[in-house]
Image (spheres, helix red, strand yellow):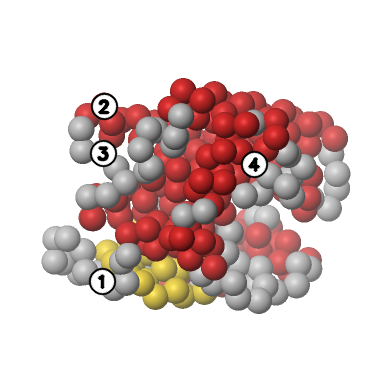
Amino acid sequence: MIDLHYAPTPNGWKISIMLEELGLPYKVIPINIRGGEQFKPEFLAISPNNRIPAIVDWLPADAGRPFPVFETGAILIYLAEKTGRFLPADLRGRSVVMQWLMWQMAGLGPMLGQHGHFALYAAEKIPYAIERYRDEAARLYRVLDTQLGKTGAYVAGDYSIADIACFPWTMTHKAQGFTLDDYPNVKRWYADVRARPQVQAGLAIGKFVKEPFDEEARKNMFGARAKEMAIKQ
């Protein structure tokens, strides 16, 4: 059994999709990130960066104590290695998947996250920041489109954790004002991935009611609460 500490966000969807794809038994433990539950000591014990998602594997391969894993890239690799799926064993295939996974972790996710923050959530609209992150997000969409034009199927050839990592962030395209018509290879890939029954099941996990997006939620989600805790320490 795996505990999934989770909220329905692009990063949360990565792991619920992965668990559905693998068919592993798991239990969803909702984390109300607007209400600040990510700062509770019991959650910080398994996710010291106070970010969702995180997992606890109660049956790790070494038959040892329950094993916690945080950071979505690390979780995807851990689950892929645990099951021998969605991460090639050969040197070149594995490296290509890992390169695109790192690309998502270092580029696609953070840049779309920053654009979404400044364009949609920031109390003060800063044109320079919105333009800066929109341009970078558009560049990354073009990189992904070019790669998918080369592979003709999935991000790294066969369906892998690279696709599972990238797909949830592209789900934000409409909210962020992008159209996939500008990226035809991404549009084809997006439709193919979204049509997978396991992906649909993963997206349906944890559609729990969100708390209102008020000033307290803003503090909890956008750094003010973490800054307060750091000062107290």
Identify the image quadrant of residue 230: bottom right
Q: Would residue 24 be found to the left or right of residue 138 on screen?
A: left
Q: Secondary structure at mark 3?
A: loop
Question: Circle 2 sits on which residue?
Answer: 92
Question: Circle 3 sits on which residue?
Answer: 88
Q: Quadrant of the N terminus?
A: bottom left
Question: Circle 1 sits on which residue?
Answer: 58
Q: Secondary structure at mark 2?
A: helix
Q: Nearer the viewer, residue 181 or 78?
A: 181
How many angstroms separate mark 1 from mark 3 (CA)? Answer: 25 Å
Q: Secondary structure at mark 4?
A: helix
Q: Residues within 10 Å of mark 3 (few under 14, many from 20)?
A: some
Q: Is residue 201 above or below residue 73?
A: below
Residue 80 position, x and y percent, is 29, 50
Residue under the image location 61 percent in, 38 percent down? 187
Residue 81 position, x and y percent, is 24, 50
Q: Nearer the viewer, residue 220 or 146?
A: 146
Q: Residues within 10 Å of mark 1 (few under 14, many from 20)?
A: some
How many angstroms separate mark 1 from mark 2 (CA)? Answer: 32 Å
Residue under the image location 68 percent in, 55 percent down? 222
- The amino acid type of the residue labelled 4 equals Leu
How many angstroms separate mark 3 from mark 4 (CA)? Answer: 28 Å
Q: Secondary structure at mark 1?
A: loop
- The amino acid type of the residue labelled 1 equals Trp
How many angstroms separate mark 2 from mark 3 (CA)? Answer: 8 Å
Question: Circle 4 sits on which residue?
Answer: 112
Q: Nearer the viewer, residue 203 or 13?
A: 203
